[in-house]
Amino acid sequence: MAITKLNSSVRVTHVGTATAVIELDNLTILTDPYFSPEGTEWIGKSGAKLVNSYQPPLGLEDLPSIDLILLSHEDHKDNLDDLGRQLLNGRHVFTTTDGARNLAPRKAHLPGGECLGFIVSAEHFGTSNGKPNAIYFSGDTVYIDELAKIKDRFHVSVALFSLGKAMVPKPGGGMLQITMDSKQAVQLMRDIEPDIVIPLHFEGWSLFKEGKSEIEEVVKEEGFEDKFKFLAPGVNTKILVSIEEFSTPSTGWQLDDFVLDPGYVASREELRWLMLNTAQTAPPSPVHGDSFISGLDTHSGEDRSSAQHTTSHLLSQGRRIEYLKNYISQVAPWLDMFDSSRAFGMQVPLLAQTSPALLCAILAISARQKERKDASDGKSTPQKSFDSLELYQEAIRLLTPLLARDWRRHLEGCAALFDAFEVHGFCGGLLQAVFWCHARMDLCGALISDGTQSTMIPPIAWLPPGTDESNVRQTFKNIQSPDMHANYAVYLCAKACELVSDRTHHDELGAPNGCTAEVFTSRWTRLWDDLQAWIDDRPNELVPLQIIESKPFPQILYLHWAAISSNQLYHTACILMLGSMPRRHSHVPGLTGSSIWHAKRICGISLTNPHQGCLNNAIQPLWLAGRLLSHESEHTILVDLIRDIESTTGWGTCWRIPDLGAAWGYSVRKSSRSKNVPLGQRQNTQTG
């Protein structure tokens, strides 16, 4: 899809028929309100009985606060029923002239003549190619040539089409079509060129002559399936995001096409909804997490080929094997970075043999990594559709019936699941591995915020329930595992982010979080001591095998995967701490008191240890370290390293380069070095 320049986020919930909730920042719009239950009967103007065969997933009580209503007409029960009429009072209603007359004495804002749809636009939506960005709702209309004029005045970012090819009897005999069919929808898409189309009004009534399958078939034949998105009923789905939502702290960056693909965005929101509802409906049970894992084994006792059969319509056997090999060799090591038992590399593939949803999930992440890596190597170009997207959507489709349904949304995704299933950093087994994988990503998000946010899950919730903060060091130490000591570094770095965020919110925003100067100094001192104890207490597996104090960066070699990132996170936490040092600690003696020393350690570790999983997790530490470097030769090495990480792993990293250029005060050139020098052999020209 073309990346929209709409300066607002757009979320849509399809309730059913032509009823949808459109959320534009702080404005909430409702279209053609119909909420009557399945089985409701109406007598049409022709005397024919109309029966609703669709159960709306939401009731009036489930709606957010509605600011205005777009009503295409008031005299069709499938566009405005008795329940919907209750919503008209006290709200702005945009409708037709005769509709306003029939709805009097309510206030109404009137388009001229009969309604051919509604355009919603505002100055803060921004422009695309010189035209105001807009949302278009067609209402009940057929295609007419006049609709093509919309493109002359507006760039349609999101279009909601009422389809279904609704047919009603004419007063003098024969049938009259009153809503668009799929071919008319395609023609209108050609005319107005919307970024994405949300189909409405195609199920539940006998007067609809085209359903979802017929519409999908025509849209696919005409080549518009990438812009055409059916929404899961009742699911609040993010359709478009503003560029600002993807911006880095200091500057913009180039978006991956996949990030704003409408299919991916909608699928991601559906997955998030599933996680929220599962968390909300999970009964408290000390073994609920185990039952959740066992629930993924949907074909227990059946032939193990059943899971593989599920993907056969999406992938050839050769591509499936290729993605599995890539998952095991390239993706799983990144997930297992702090886990010597290799839960993601060993246990997850075994579970996937009998779980179609899990198999599709690991194939999807493997396919996406390979797509990005091949594109960066010049082996392929970005496609409009990806194996990864199809596999991702299939994984969600298979997962849906396994999870309980409840229409409440109060928590956030994985964090809600962890809380509901009592999953934390010490729960053991596969769930513990999953938790720490999430914790590292959570920490990455906190580092990206540059001191404005902590982790989504507070670090105290990473510990066993009831753990006192004064006993945290001993809690990690009791496990007597290098993996857990590495996880302790993740925890300490998260605590540093939390401390900096609390102080920032207290001083700059006046947040009443209790982080006064005295409290901040006490917390800072205790955390600094814990960080230095971490380095002193490292097991042999986390100690460098060899250190060469070369220039401009040291060469520091580790044998253990977890040693690489955990030591980097120690140095990262120290940089955060030294950058927010309280006045009482005006100086920390020795090399540990030098932010530059820690920064060069971070760079040296990545340059010496080319483990792919650790390279992915190094981006935010490298960014923090890079801002402290002053010499152009250091900048060149670091920029080349970041580019190498993207080309080697396939994970997007180069978006951090403009941020570094902004910190250094100049624009970084696109590329200046040979691409043939392997990562790990490119850096220091002097040793000392």
Image: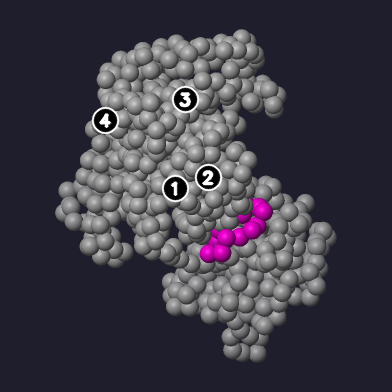
Residue 498 sits in which quadrant?
Answer: top right
In the rendered view, tell whether residue 306 sits above or below residue 191: above
How far from the left and from the top, in percent, is residue 424? 38, 28
Stretch of the chain drawn in magenta: 1-16
Type of residue at label 1? Arg
Q: Nearer the viewer, residue 222 or 620?
A: 620
Mark 2–mark 1 contact, CB under 8 Å?
yes
How far from the left and from the top, in percent, is residue 570? 43, 24
Q: Which mark is residue 656?
A: none
> What whole-number distance in Å separates the C-alpha atoms at marks 4 and 3?
20 Å
Sequence-first disc among 1 and 4: 4
Type of residue at label 4? Leu
> What whole-number distance in Å separates the C-alpha atoms at marks 2 and 1?
9 Å
Q: Nearer the viewer, residue 409 or 441?
A: 441
Q: Which mark is residue 643?
A: 1
Residue position for label 3: 598
Rendered image coloring scheme:
one colour
Type of residue at label 3? His
Residue position for label 4: 559
Residue position for label 2: 657
Residue at the (57%, 60%) spot, across then down: 3
Residue at the (26%, 30%) spot, across then down: 559
> What whole-number distance in Å separates the C-alpha atoms at marks 4 and 2?
29 Å
In the rendered view, tell whether residue 521 sits above or below residue 500: above
Sequence-first disc among 3 and 1: 3
